[in-house]
Amino acid sequence: MRLLSLFTAFLLSSVTAHAVAASPADIISHAPDSAWRTIPPEQLLLMTMSNGQHIIIALAPDFAPIHVANVIHLTRAHAWDSGAIIRTQENYVVQWRVRHEQTPSPKPFIEHPPAEYERPLAGLSFKALNMPDAYAPQAGFAHEWAVGTDGTNIWPAQCYGTIGVARGMPPDTGNGKELYVVNGEAPRQLDRNLAVIGRVLTGMEYLNALPRGTGPLGFYTNPHQNVRLKSVTLVSDLPAERRPSMQVMRTDSPSFNDYITARAARTDAFFVHAAHGVTLCNVPIPSREMPTR
Amino acid sequence: MRLLSLFTAFLLSSVTAHAVAASPADIISHAPDSAWRTIPPEQLLLMTMSNGQHIIIALAPDFAPIHVANVIHLTRAHAWDSGAIIRTQENYVVQWRVRHEQTPSPKPFIEHPPAEYERPLAGLSFKALNMPDAYAPQAGFAHEWAVGTDGTNIWPAQCYGTIGVARGMPPDTGNGKELYVVNGEAPRQLDRNLAVIGRVLTGMEYLNALPRGTGPLGFYTNPHQNVRLKSVTLVSDLPAERRPSMQVMRTDSPSFNDYITARAARTDAFFVHAAHGVTLCNVPIPSREMPTR
């Protein structure tokens, strides 16, 4: 029995029949419909790899509207079709680009967007995490995004799954034709240094299982190593019956409060020491496919 | 030129010809020999996958001596040869075990080790990070390990690359026959809940590019999916000419102070906002192969 338990699936997890109090997973599975916000289809991208794997992306127009608009224009112009993943750097980022380096810009398109790295706090509801944060005066959540704030401005945190716009040295050189996603320990030194256009909701397990590039910074050294994108589609452009419908947990809901509490002080029977603390990027905002019923 | 910069390798990196001040990478590459500690070969494991890929592991006898001794006894008994990676959970852990679930225990071996999850601070040199930490009263470094402390006890932090002993519900059920490594955002809620026996120094890029398991918690559902280990060897048991020789940066060295400073306030020209802060697990302790000269 000891060996059985040692070698079966409940190790290290909140998903256990022995739980003595609500685990984060329990809270997510029991959250009422009122705790969930449906993401509008015009803020969702469906990325399909050449092997048929799907990645669903939520866009962040509240934070980098011009960059997001560029990405949408590229999407509608099919610029990502036959695009490529050109970089996989362990514990840092996976990066992809449009079909060719010289892909013409669609119209409309902003070639040199301003540095949309932070925005005024005014106009967004901020919910403080109330935990020590090494990177921002205050950390918390705004409209289902993990953020930092100094009380005047607010910016998305570069957590695992965050998608940003790669750029060269001048801040206005990232136009959206090349994107990256954080695939490891949150590189929050990037906060306010790159434009965040969204985050991956599903499919990170595909993006992150690619062979690491062997060139500097994890770039693939041979273009034949590049993994191809089949297509990226704005979900609102899909026929209604083919649209994935995604929901995120409202960060102003009681369920989310419970979820933070459970992340900060795990009470599952497995834990012998509760931390009574949690970092911003270790409170991943739950998302789910909208249940059909 | 703009496009060139947009599509070439210096993006998002400290490795740039435009650096105006020492980057973390610069500090590592210029650190004097006195900043490095050579790891004794009896504290290094060489794990070889069935496809020939190598992973080098540093053991942590200061923190979990009985568990580490068990792992060494299993190694010398060749219990890992033809072992298997049985679990890859995205943004959590990769887990592996000895050859068979019923692998007999070598002698000597402790079937039910005590919960070596923390130890007295006395006897170790602690260097404070002096940054806010959400998980421990104080975070820092001790003998080239990232740690938390409450002033009385000290424990390893479960950062990316940390290797721990999987267990069942009772704390004494992890004997070392099944290990995991953290492969994403640091799950520091595990601090003081599992025995840490070491960390991966090289080869995470192989362990973390495996397909994710599709069973609950990322377990592989079909044993044929398991990736095989060829062998694990204690480096001191290798012939001298075949021993990898690894060094870690001394956390009590001036170079490491400079490194922390640079991680906390990136001054590379790429950065337009310096965070002036950094989390414990975002200060990965540098390691290198000992230079030959």
Image (cartoon, coloured by chain):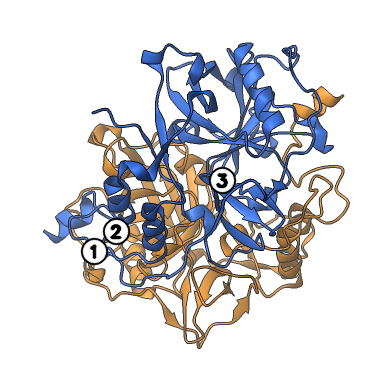
Chain colours: A orange, B blue
- Percent from the top left, x then y, of residue A40? 54, 68
Q: Nearer the viewer, residue A230 or A217?
A: A217
Q: CA distance from mark 3 to mark 1?
A: 36 Å
Kindly identify the amino acid type of the residue bearing the numbered disc 3.
Asn
Kindly identify the amino acid type of the residue bearing the numbered disc 2.
Ala
Dot 1 lies on which element? loop
Parent chain of label 3: B
- Percent from the top left, x then y, of residue B192? 72, 48
Kindly identify the amino acid type of the residue bearing the numbered disc 1.
Pro
Q: CA distance from mark 1 to mark 2?
A: 6 Å
Parent chain of label 2: A
- Percent from the top left, x then y, of residue A146? 55, 68
| Residue located beneath label 2 in the image | A77
Dot 2 lies on which element? loop
Q: Is residue A82 visible?
A: no
Does B63 sit left or right of A191 as displayed?
right
Q: Are there few (<14), some (14-19), or many (20+) residues within 10 Å of tag 1?
A: some
